[in-house]
Image: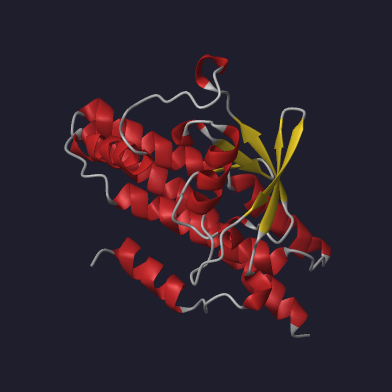
Amino acid sequence: MSWFSTQWNRFAAGNSAPGSSDVIRRIEVIWGRERLQIVLPRTSEPVTLGHLRQEIASITALPYEKIKLIHRGLILRDDRLPLTAYGLVEGSRIGLVGSREGDRPGAKTSQLSVGEQKAREKKAKEQDTSEQGLMNRITEALDSAKLLFPEVEEVEAKVEKGEAEGVEETHRRVSELLLRQLLALDSVGVNSDTTRQARKVAVKQVQHHLDRLDAAWSKFKAKSSL
């Protein structure tokens, strides 16, 4: 097991399953001038980003893969993550960027199902072992992590000022997302000095901000215990 996998398993083991306060049934989506009230399905498991995107696709006729959701400046990317991992709560408001193909409601981009399209795209990326393909995966993971860096700085600033609001939730969510990007980088099988160096630099940047976040959290807990 790699160091990244070990770190992720330790992180996951330290987080308990969400309680009733984490149940999300309604999200408000801002789409241009429209405000959509999305009612989410009742499931035994936490509602994920994938569930939300499916509901939006059924209401707006947008192709699933064209739906881009934004919350607090962060693009929500991983469909497997529960909505709470992105800091969403009951009634949260998020932005939607997307347009119908050819402005025709219900237009489809492919005869494949959404699941088949996503599986095919993922497989194509993983099978592309060219230097450019590997560099694209490294860049994508680093770009996703960079969207979180301002939130790390925000936590540090709040801790310095002695402000407690949102620190714990932001630390938990951003830590999880940064660890996911480290795992994504770890999964890239580099095959040249160029890709090896690029991954090394990317890992260093992500790990640096994760360390800063953890240091701020430790400082916050120390202050809280006084």
Name the residue nearer the viewer: 179 or 47.
47
Name the residue nearer the viewer: 153 or 6.
6
Q: Is residue 129 visible?
A: yes
Q: Position of residue 6 (x, y in %)?
A: 33, 70
Position above or below: 97 against 156: above
Question: In the image as oriented, which residue stretches furthest toward the bottom?
Answer: 226
Q: Residue at x 26, y 30 (%)?
A: 133
Q: Which residue is drawn at 59% across and 66% down?
A: 172
Q: Where is residue 96 in the image (x, y as percent from the top left)?
A: 64, 35
Position above or below: 1 against 48: below
Q: Position of residue 200 (x, y in %)?
A: 33, 45
Q: Residue at x 40, y 43 (%)?
A: 202
Residue 134, quarter of the rendered image: top left
Q: On the rendered structure, is 180 left or right of 148?
A: left
Total numbered circles = 0
Position above or below: 5 against 201: below
- Image quadrant in which the N terminus is located: bottom left
Name the residue nearer the viewer: 177 or 210.
177
Name the residue nearer the viewer: 23 or 192.
23
Q: Residue at x 63, y 73 (%)?
A: 218
Q: On the rendered structure, is 60 left or right of 208?
A: right
